[in-house]
Image (cartoon, helix red, strand yellow):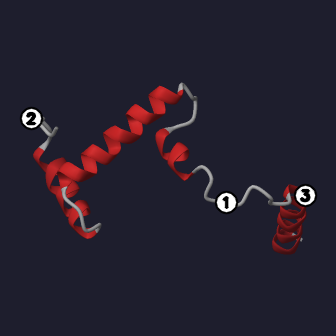
Amino acid sequence: METELTLKLEKELITEAKNLAKLKGTNLSKMIANYLNSVVTFSKKENNTSPILFEITGILPSNLDNKHLKDDYKKHLKEKYL
């Protein structure tokens, strides 16, 4: 069941948020609802991870070879600075 909510926010913030919502093809109500859903989900998980980090968790494959990544990064640094 949906219900209305009144918020008091700075006019400039509302204008910028509406513009951002329009760019993303949504509206301000949906954007705020999505944010609140992520905050509630985060708090239910009782996790120390931020809601944004929690949302992107799992995007990368879990079978990444960390040693390979570290070696590539070290190689990059050597080429850049030496």
Q: In whole angstroms, how far apart are the C-alphas of marks 3 and 2?
A: 51 Å
Q: Residue at x 14, y 38 (%)?
A: 9
| Residue 60 - label | 1
Local crowd size for mark 2, using a 10 Å CA cut-off: few (<14), some (14–19), many (≥20): few
Classify residue 68 as left or right of residue 41.
right
Q: Secondary structure at mark 3?
A: helix
Q: In whole angstroms, how far apart are the C-alphas of marks 1 and 3?
A: 16 Å
Question: Mark 2 highlights which residue?
Answer: 6
Question: Mark 3 highlights which residue?
Answer: 67
Classify residue 49 as left or right of residue 10.
right
Q: Position of residue 44 (x, y in %)?
A: 47, 27
Q: Which of the two labelled residues, at mark 3 and mark 2, occupies the earlier sequence position?
A: 2
Q: Residue at x 47, y 34 (%)?
A: 42
Q: Residue at x 25, y 45 (%)?
A: 32
Indicate whether 33 appears above or below 7. Answer: below
Q: Which of the two labelled residues, at mark 1 and mark 2, occupies the earlier sequence position?
A: 2
Amino acid type at circle 2 is Thr
Q: Position of residue 20 (x, y in %)?
A: 25, 62
Q: Secondary structure at mark 1?
A: loop
Q: Which of the two labelled residues, at mark 1 and mark 3, occupies the earlier sequence position?
A: 1
Classify residue 41 as left or right of residue 21.
right
CB under 8 Å between callouts 1 and 3?
no
